Image: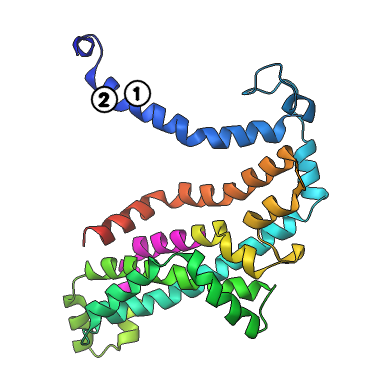
Amino acid sequence: MAYLGSLPKRTVTLYIPLLLFVIVLLFPFYWMAVTTFKPDNELLSRDGNPFWIVKPTLAHLNKLLFHTSYPEWLWNTMVVSIVSTFVSLLCSVFAAYAIERLRFRGAKQVGLSIFLAYLVPPSILFIPLAAIVFKLGLFDTRWALILTYPTFLIPFATWLLMGYFRSIPYELEECALIDGATRFQILWKIILPLSVPGLISAAIFAFTLSWNEFIYALTFVSSSEVKTVSVAVVTELVEGDVYHWGPLMAGALLGSLPVAIIYSFFVEYYVSGLTGAVKE
C-alpha cells in the first residue's frame, strides 16, 4: 500500500471508485444516445469507433415520432402512471394514518401483512388478475392498468408512509383533538404538511414503477393505440427477427427522460423520505 503515500488517500478510496460507479451507471444512457443519433451505415459497419458518431442524424427520431404511434404510447404511459400514482398515494395515506395513529387492535399485524403483500411477485399475481380484468370488461383498456397497478404500489407506499408518520410527534394530534379538530382536519392540516418528503418519496416510487411496468402492460393490453412505452417499444419496433436499433434506442432514451428529470428535481426529498421511513 505504499502508493497511498504518493496519492491522496481520499482520491484512491473515494473519488476513483465513485468515478467508476458513475461510468458504469451512465454508460447505458450514453449508448442509447449514441445509437439514437448514429446513421444505419455506421450502426451496421464493423469499421470505425462504435462509441462515437461520425455523422449524426435525426432520422431515427423522425421515424419514431412521426412514423410510429410513439406520442400516443407516451401519452398512455403518462395517463396511466399519473392516475395510478394518485390513487395509490390517496389509499396509502389513509391506510398508513389509520395503522399508525388510530391504535386499533392488531394494527402492527395489519401493517406487516400489507408490507408482505408487496413481496408477492407480479409474475404470480397477473394470472388471477387477468381473469378479473376480463370478467369486468376492462381488457385492452387503460383502466385495466390503472386499477391493477395499485395492487403492488399501495403496499410499499403504505409501509413507507407508516414509517414517516411514526416520526411525527403524537402530542401535536393530542393538542389538536383537545382544541376540537377532527381526525380528517388533523390529517389534512398537520400530518400531511409535515410529511411532504415522505409523500414525495412515495409518489416518485409509485410513478417510477408505473412508468416502467412491463408484465401487466403486456398481459392486459394488446391494441397498439393503448400500449405503454415499455411494452410498445419492444413489440412494435421489432419486425420478426429485424431489430430497428435506432428507433428502439430513441424510444428507450425518450422514455427514460421523464423519470430522470423527476428524480433530479426531487432527489433531496426522496432521500429524506426514505431515510425517515427506514430509520423508524
Task: Tell me if 178 is positioned left or right of 40 in this view.
Answer: left
Tag 2's secondary structure?
A: helix
Q: Quadrant of the N terminus?
A: top left
- Asked where in the image residue 105 lies, by quadrant, the reply is bottom left
Extreme right residue here? 67
* Main SS category, magenta section: helix
Q: Residue at x 78, y 30 (%)?
A: 40
Q: Amino acid at mark 1?
A: Ile
Q: Quadrant of the C terminus?
A: bottom left
Q: Residue at x 65, y 31 (%)?
A: 34
The residue under label 2 is 13
For the residues labelled 2 and 1, the Cα–Cα distance comes to 7 Å
The residue under label 1 is 16
Q: Which residues are magenta?
A: 190-207
Tag 1's secondary structure?
A: helix
Relative to 57, is 132 above or below? below
Q: Which mark is residue 171?
A: none
Relative to 198, is 245 above or below? above
Residue 199 forms part of the magenta stretch: yes
Tags 2 and 1 in contact by the CB under 8 Å rule? yes
Residue 68 forms part of the magenta stretch: no
Task: Tell me if 147 is positioned left or right of 276 in this view.
Answer: right
* Residue 112 placement (x, y as % from top left): 28, 73
Numbered disc total: 2
* Residue 29 placement (x, y as % from top left): 56, 37
